[in-house]
Image (spheres, rainbow, N blue to C red):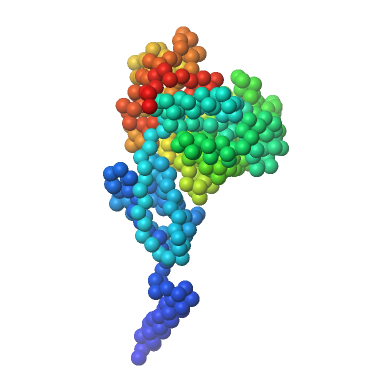
Amino acid sequence: MTKKRIGIFSITCALILLFFWYMKVHGTSDPMPFTSGKVIDFSTGMAIEGATVTLHDRVAKTDKKGMFFFNTVGRKLAVRACGYLRAEMKTSNPSLSRSLTIRLQPFTPKALYLTVYGIGDRRIRSSALKLIEETELNSLVIDVKGDRGIIPYRSSLPAASKIGAQKIITVKDMKALIGSLRERGVYLIARIVVFKDNLLALAKPHLAVQTRDGTVWRDREDLAWADPFRKEVWDYNISIAVEAAQYGFDEIQFDYVRFPDTVGLVFSKPNTEEERVKAISDFLVEAKRRLAPYNVFLDADIFGYVFWNINDTKIGQKLESLIDPVEYLSPMLYPSGFRYGIPGYRKPVAHPYEIVSLTLRNGKERANLPSVRFRPWLQAFRDYAFDRRLFGGREIRDQIKAAEDFGSHGWMLWNPQNTYSADGLKKE
């Protein structure tokens, strides 16, 4: 026998011995534990491609046939896909290999927004829930960190107390509140205002956006902002998102995930378009990584003109760079916000349907994404930029119709006064 054959024979024997040792130790004839399966539509039974499947800290995507595979086993499998509710499946014997079928329920969020104060006020909250019971509404966007940096519940994060984010508590028991809303079947979206953070910026000036003379810069509302380049700022906001996911929110929505729209400011890195775009994209990528074990959807609020502008609109939001990190893109399509109009429409408040429809279509064409990846914010407040007109039932319905004609994954109504009515909404 040649030396080469002896070597091959020895390796083969070693592999056989290793195989029998594995079976003896693990007490199974299966040499490789695995978890596999198929994700399908609950209603149609059709395979769902691109669903996110999580097993512990591992993440997989389903193929065109809806199939996924892990070379390990576990106690709980979590699944989500755009256009559907999240799902979880617990296994009775996590040591056994298995092939599973997971059925996802189609769902289209139709939401209204409640501020830090709105969610904590019993009267306002009850009014919102009454609308959800009586109309097509089925979801709430709730401030988990508001426009002034306040976290309205008792957070476990030490930094929140240190910077003053816990001075005003409007929700005494977030766990109980989430439980009661879930019992009503309400889909829950946690809004987190990221870089517009007056409390963090003032408590830690080295993390703040600054002026050229080295002082903390303040915006038109006299609020300071945190530097989007600072990793410490990233970590604080992502930690809040993780806490919200642990409470049971279905979705994490990052707002003000951008740079201030003011020139001449000083940051910890050069304020170039390339650097700005990279900072915003990298923050969302890191958030996605940290949130992976919690099976929550990730959503980013986007300035409306980003769907039209080829550059980053001077705020770090470039449409093409936002596609991969998040599941849902939420452009703020308030007609009042389009102060320069759009092609063919110089007075946007007079054409709410066209503003919503054309902006969504332009964004879809540029991003090359299915309509279900978009869920717009719609205007439910008085105009502030043109003629001060009320946005009542007709204007709200026109916006909703535009979003639904486009095929978006629902829509969200914005009124910072927490004032909503059934006007423009379909009765349940």
Q: Position of residue 38 (x, y in %)?
A: 34, 53
Q: Position of residue 186 (x, y in %)?
A: 46, 35
- 109 or 344: nearer the viewer: 109
Please identify the residue farthest to the bottom as the structure is shown. Answer: 1
Q: Which residue does the image show at 38% across and 34% down from the upper left?
A: 108
19 vs 247, left or right, is left
Q: In percent of the image, x 70 and y 27: which residue is there? A: 215
- The percent position of residue 120, horizontal first and vertical second, equals 60, 29
**Number of numbered discs overlaid on the protein picture:** 0
Q: Which sits in the foreground, 340 or 395?
A: 395
Evaluate whether residue 246 shows in this view. yes
Q: Is residue 62 visible?
A: no
Left or right: residue 187 versus residue 263 is: left
Image quadrant occupied by the N terminus: bottom left
Query: Residue placed at 39% from the left, 87% from the top?
Result: 6
Q: Residue at x 64, y 40 (%)?
A: 155
Q: Is residue 329 above or below residue 401?
A: below
Quadrant location, the C terminus = top left
From the top left corner, tell me how far across and down residue 112 is, in percent.
47, 27
